[in-house]
Amino acid sequence: MERKQLLLILLIIGTAFWGVSYSVTKMAIGADSPNTFLFYRFFLAVIVLSIIFWKYVKDTNWDYIKTGFILAVPMFLGIQLQTVGLKYTDASQCSFVAGLTVIIIPLLKLALYKTNASLKIWIAALTALTGLFIIAIKEKFTINPGDLFTIAGAFAFAVYLITVEKHSALKNLLYCIVPMFAFCALFAFFLALADSQSQWFPKNDTFWIGVIYCALFSTAYMYTVSNISQRYLSAERVAVIYLFEPVFGAIGAFFILGENLSWRLLLGGSLIFAATIISEVNLKKNKLRVLIRKN
């Protein structure tokens, strides 16, 4: 199996972890502060990753720490905003709206770097945007606060993925992973200190189960695989693969939280999934075949 194929499989497995994490996080937070939850999530991830990547940690220098900070800012904003969004909207809806990242990336690249994505990426992005419109926009073109937080988080994630792509071409980001999450834990700690609703030791077992799940699978596993993948896959391609996430998110919300799968969610979700397929299809000799882009 080629490296790109393996990374795509690992990314899709990670999107399943991410998708389920929306329901797990919504249950874990409840009425508690999302910032306390995020602090423990990142802190545990730092401990686990420091053990796994100790050979990189001990050789980390100031340059890698600085890059870790640069990556941590947009990533933390993305996670924090979408975690807050979960308090105001359904987990399934939040997971789909978060997929807006897929169209924000080529738009940001066009605005910032004057670079354009391929036609099929634009078609996939617009198809995904149509699906997201169906899901998020309600009667009289209203949108709830949770969706607004989630959309803002999607912008932050887009910046994060573009930044990872930029730095991964220059250095091995495995040296930056632990510093990145350490900064995220620090950001969450200060926000939790300023939050009057913070409870540092919740007695809710669901809170701690959620922390462990999100720290190990949604954070340590997924962001490590993502950072490695972007040495070989573009930010646009990674973002489109992330569109598997809301599919798993909807399934998780249905079974874990008992959320209803409305026609809007099913139709919009189908379009988003179609966008994933479009991004992987090439037309060659009048035949459609799915392949991994070869440089």
Image (cartoon, rainbow, N blue to C red):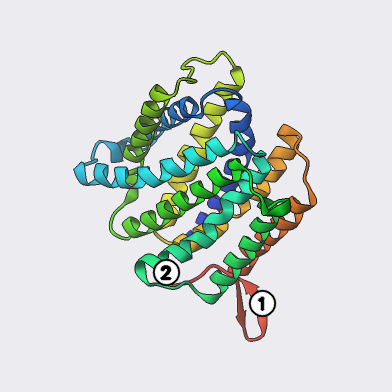
Mark 2 residue crowding within 10 angstroms, few (<14) / some (14–19) / many (20+): few
Residue 284 in picture, x, y percent from top left: 61, 83
Residue 57 seen in render: yes
The relative height of residue 10 versus residue 2 in the rendered view (above or below) is: above
Q: Nearer the viewer, residue 281 or 88?
A: 88
Residue 288, numbered circle = 1
The relative height of residue 52 versus residue 228 in the rendered view (above or below) is: above
Which residue is labeled 2 in the image?
Answer: 110
Indicate the secondary structure of the residue bearing disc 2.
Answer: helix
Q: What residue lies at 40% left-to-right and 67% top-to-bottom?
A: 111
Q: Inspect the image, locate mark 1, and give the three-letter code of the amino acid beneath it.
A: Leu
Residue 193, numbered circle = none
Query: Hey, which residue is sitting farthest front in the picture?
Result: 140
Image quadrant where residue 240 sits: bottom right
The relative height of residue 183 versus residue 295 in the rendered view (above or below) is: above
Image-based side of 241 in relation to 141, left or right: left
Residue 274 in picture, x, y percent from top left: 68, 63
Q: Inspect the image, locate mark 2, and give the three-letter code of the amino acid beneath it.
A: Leu
* First in residue order: circle 2 vs circle 1: 2
Image quadrant where residue 273 sits: bottom right
Q: What residue lies at 32% left-to-right and 56% top-to-bottom?
A: 167
Q: What residue lies at 43% left-to-right and 63% top-to-bottom?
A: 108
Indicate the secondary structure of the residue bearing disc 1.
Answer: strand
Image quadrant where residue 290 sits: bottom right
Determine whether label 2 and label 1 are within 8 Å by CB: no
